[in-house]
Image (cartoon, rainbow, N blue to C red):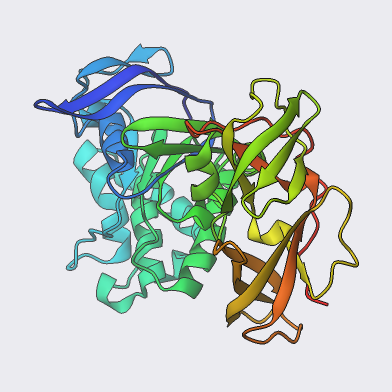
Amino acid sequence: MASVTLNKLSKSYGNTPVLHNIDLHIEHGELVVLVGPSGCGKSTLLRVLCGLEDISSGELRIDADVVNNLSPADRGIAMVFQSYALYPHMNVFKNMAFGLKIQGSSKEDIALRVLAAAKVLHIDHLLERLPRELSGGQRQRVAIGRAIVRKPRLFLFDEPLSNLDASLRAKTRIELSRLHRDLAATMVYVTHDQVEAMTLGDKIVVLNEGHVQQAGTPLTLYQQPANRFVATFIGSPTINLLPARVLEAGSTGVRLQLADGSKVLALVDGSQLQTGESVEIGLRPEHCSVDESAAHTGPDDTALHAEITLVEHLGESNLLYLKTDTDQELIVRGDGNAAVRLGDAVIVRAAPESLYLFRADGTAAPRLRPGNMRSAHVH
């Protein structure tokens, strides 16, 4: 178990910068998830951590040791890749033991470590099988076990579940979460799947174009995104955005005018906003509700007239795709048991405390009360 500190770390390929002045601290025993769109630099950052890529500038510390110039073998790191990379001619035991054998460990020590790791991963009954006799999830656990037996200071995972089907991904994700708890190990995990990020991570680091957009707990990134990019990346379906203009702004809230002329209140800190400033309001699909009348609309609620253009039935919920009178497209998560029809005219409502607000440069105004959200429903 180790702490990791990145201080102004940058990486370039020739004249092309890939990572820009990254400052990040990972605590002992923390599971940190790196997320972002394709090409954002998350896998490159992982390769820099393990020593497969050189650092262009900055400093990388594992505990108190500066490891910029250390080889991968000397960093005390184990990496699990998207590909299982198992030796096809070796059984599970030999695959897990191979690294220890190369290090010169004794047969007794190898047997103890492999058996202990296999029990933790629930594959101790598979030790005599060849990789071709295993399921995808079992192969991935063997790859993880091969890392565990080395007792590294730091585990690195590069999209280890992306080759698995949806149900197996969910099951293996739970097993990884339990493994982290049982080992109390420091882990860095790369994924493009925000569900994995939200459910696995003690801390999430959102990257875009080689820059850290925000780092924090899953709940912090969901409730208090630092900017428009983080708000649109965290949450599924993505947040709805509506153009608006500031009418009044203060530290206790902001009064806004929407494109249809309606006036709404957002409970955000507007002390840095100016009257007349153009902004965007954010409405998460799960924080909106729809109704066929305005009877349940509060005096400060956002209330938008819209028409249902598409319904996706998910069982426990529906995703309602709507178009407002001003041709704005919205998504609302509604009750799966509600009777909804294409072409229905509805009112989309959201309470002042559920709104997000973003300035023209993308920065977010701090929300005053990020809790107390209302569930979507159809009457």
Q: Is residue 335 visible?
A: no
Give coordinates of residue 25: x percent, y percent.
48, 23
* Residue nearest the observer in this picture, 161 or 345: 345
* Residue nearest the observer in this picture, 134 or 193: 193
State whether residue 253 is above or below residue 97. Answer: above
* Residue nearest the observer in this picture, 357 or 184: 357
State whether residue 357 is above or below residue 336. Answer: above
Which quarter of the figure is the C terminus placed in?
Answer: bottom right
Residue at the image point whose x is 33% and y is 30% from the top: 76
Give coordinates of residue 20: x percent, y percent.
30, 24
State whether residue 346 is above or below residue 111. Answer: below
The single residue placed furthest to the front in the displayed view is 261
Tell me where residue 341 sits by quadrant.
bottom right
Q: How many numbered marks have been drawn onto this rendered protein structure?
A: 0
Could you tell whether 58 is left or right of 171 in the image? Answer: left
Could you tell whether 134 is left or right of 73 in the image? Answer: right
Q: Is residue 147 visible?
A: yes
Residue at the image point whose x is 51% and y is 49% from the top: 232
Give coordinates of residue 80: x percent, y percent.
33, 49
Residue at the image point whose x is 70% and y is 45% from the top: 355
Tell me where residue 274 sits by quadrant.
top right
Give coordinates of residue 4: x percent, y percent.
43, 23
* Residue nearest the observer in this picture, 191 or 160: 191
Residue at the image point whose x is 40% and y is 68% from the top: 138
